[in-house]
Amino acid sequence: MSQAQVVQRPERVYTDAELRAPFIYRDDEALEKKFQLGQMKRLFKYVANHPRLVALALIATLGNLFATLFGPYMVGRAIDGAIGQGMTGALVADAVILLLTYALNYVASHYRIYLTNLLGQTVIQRLREELFSHVQRLSLGFFDERPAGSVLVRIMNDVNSLQDLFTNGVINSITNIFTLVGIVVIMLSLNARLALVTFIIVPIMFVVSTRLTLTIRRAWQQVRLRLSRLNAHLAEAIQGMRVTEAYTRQSENQTFFEGMNRDWMNRFLHAQRVSILFGPMVDLTSAVGSMILFWYGIHLLRAGLVTVGLLVAFANYLGNFWQPISQLGNLYNQLLVAMASSERIFQYLDTEASVKDRLDAEALPEIRGEVAFERVTFEYEPGRRAIEDVSFRAEPGQTIALVGHTGAGKSTVMNLLARFYDPTGGRILVDGHDIREMRSDSLRSQIGIVLQDTFIFSGTILDNIRYGNPAASDDDVMAAACAVYADEFIRELENGYHTEVRERGSRLSMGQRQLLSFARAILADPRILVLDEATASIDTYTEHLIQKGLQVLLAGRTAFVVAHRLSTIREADQILVFDHGHIVERGTHSELMQLRGHYYQLVEAQYQFLA
């Protein structure tokens, strides 16, 4: 016998394309779109919904603007008047006025910043809530076509990217426009020739600011994109750590991570280098403008056409001139970002649910549990039918089992019963009511569903079971847990029913999670109970306990059991055998075994496998 050998794999060097390829999603497309006025109007309706905040922000902005424009004028006036003529009383009066102006500027600026941020964050909050609310109302088909990460990006990242526009862009742009207009008017009124010479540098400043700001923004976009991919890989690596260790892929994982981390660092350093250029560039342009101002101003001063105070006032106005120019240059860039994000947000908001209640839909009254499928056909995609011409009837209190190979259509039947999808042909009746004519919430509130992949939320054991009935008392929760034999393992936990479970219940075994799901469904006290592969992940002992509990719990309820473990459905009132979307056999266990057909072959194959 040859001895096992450990094969040493050579270290692999990943190329830049390989590092990026796994994380290029549709949500990582270019973040710029052409400016669309109609879409921007729709976006700013969210701002218009808060007229009081907008009005207060504009009042604070006007106060800030007045103080900004009046301050330099008072300095020039004091130099030429009170200081030049040695008038102490007038100087004190000018100083007091100037002090009040600075105080007004401080207060108005404080409230302008506070109110604009409040306005922006309120809009972001409402937009995110509206988007999340809409997404929750969409049909399951919407989520079947999109990974969860894609939806998360829309709700969080895309909405966040509008924050700068709503917080700083709108009100600040108005402020900047009024500031520029005010400075231009004042400088032209003080001395038109000196103002026109000074404004020579403005086009250069605007072009430099706009181009450089665009470059900086694109550089930081790449940083955020790399960070997003890095986080995605890190989350995947941690969640898949068991598989990584099983296949000893730690070295390859480390190499891959280091490559992505290095790519992020290089992009970050590049963005920093570009960003550092902005301040000196603005200072340089401002210095050139000041040089032109004083060079020409000295000539006018010697000619007696201007005063020293006027030159000082011009210098102050010029100093206040560059920041609005720079910010207005950035506004268009903000609008381009907003275009891309808003387009993606409105794409979701404009998506309609494929399963919608009719306008005249009525609430389904309390049901007995009679279910009838009448020639039901359904296709997830056009031309690819999941089930075809399926008909059966379940009387109240009956247990109906659905069996067949994977993909035969069993789970599709359960999804249609819960109206997660609407059939493309035929109809489904509950107590004689076509479920498409009833409100879907009134239907689902009377159906309990237990899936194979049990989802456990972060929180306590108590909260997870109570999810099936938020109004249930602690005693009701414990009674439901006892009914499915979950009470024993729960009380063995450190805090019993108040034990905090980790994300997706990772600290619980598969069987324990499934028992919690049973308790959650039973607590909802549904008239129809759906068990979709609910015992597939439970050990034999736990399955035995559940079977005992179900004998009592299913009494009086209509139950649909989808199972691969055929031993769990022997006592079903009716067994439906599915094959490629059709019901090929139906009957009780003994009847189907006597047929020696599909069901018989499934049972024999399972016994041989277990043997």
Image: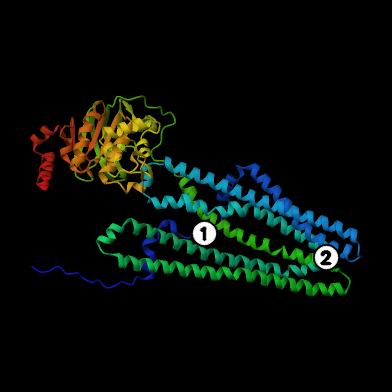
The picture places residue 107, in percent across and down from the top left corner, at: 71, 51
The picture places residue 123, in percent across and down from the top left corner, at: 56, 46
| Viewer-nearest residue: 358 or 44 | 44
| Colour scheme employed for the rendering of this structure | rainbow
Disc 1 residue type (three-letter): Glu
| Viewer-nearest residue: 105 or 378 | 105
Circle 2 Cα neighbour tier, 10 Å, few/some/many (<14 / 14–19 / ≥20): some
Relative to 336, residue 476 above or below: above
| Residue 42 in view in this figure | no
The picture places residue 409, in percent across and down from the top left corner, at: 24, 41
For the N terminus, give its image quadrant. Answer: bottom left
Res 314 → quadrant: bottom right
| Viewer-nearest residue: 260 or 380 | 260
| Viewer-nearest residue: 407 or 176 | 176
Q: Earlier in the sequence, mark 2 or mark 1?
A: 1
Q: Is residue 575 left or right of residue 498?
A: left
Disc 2 residue type (three-letter): Asn
Relative to 561, residue 509 above or below: below
Taking the spot 34% from the left edge, 43% from the top edge, the residue there is 456
Circle 1 Cα neighbour tier, 10 Å, few/some/many (<14 / 14–19 / ≥20): some
Relative to 350, residue 286 above or below: below
Taking the spot 78% from the left edge, 59% from the top edge, the residue there is 71
Q: Which residue is mark 2?
A: 191
Helix, strand or loop for disc 1: loop
Taking the spot 31% from the left edge, 57% from the top edge, the residue there is 240
| Residue 3 in view in this figure | yes
Q: Which residue is mark 1?
A: 32
The picture places residue 284, in percent across and down from the top left corner, at: 67, 72
Relative to 329, residue 133 above or below: above
Helix, strand or loop for disc 2: loop
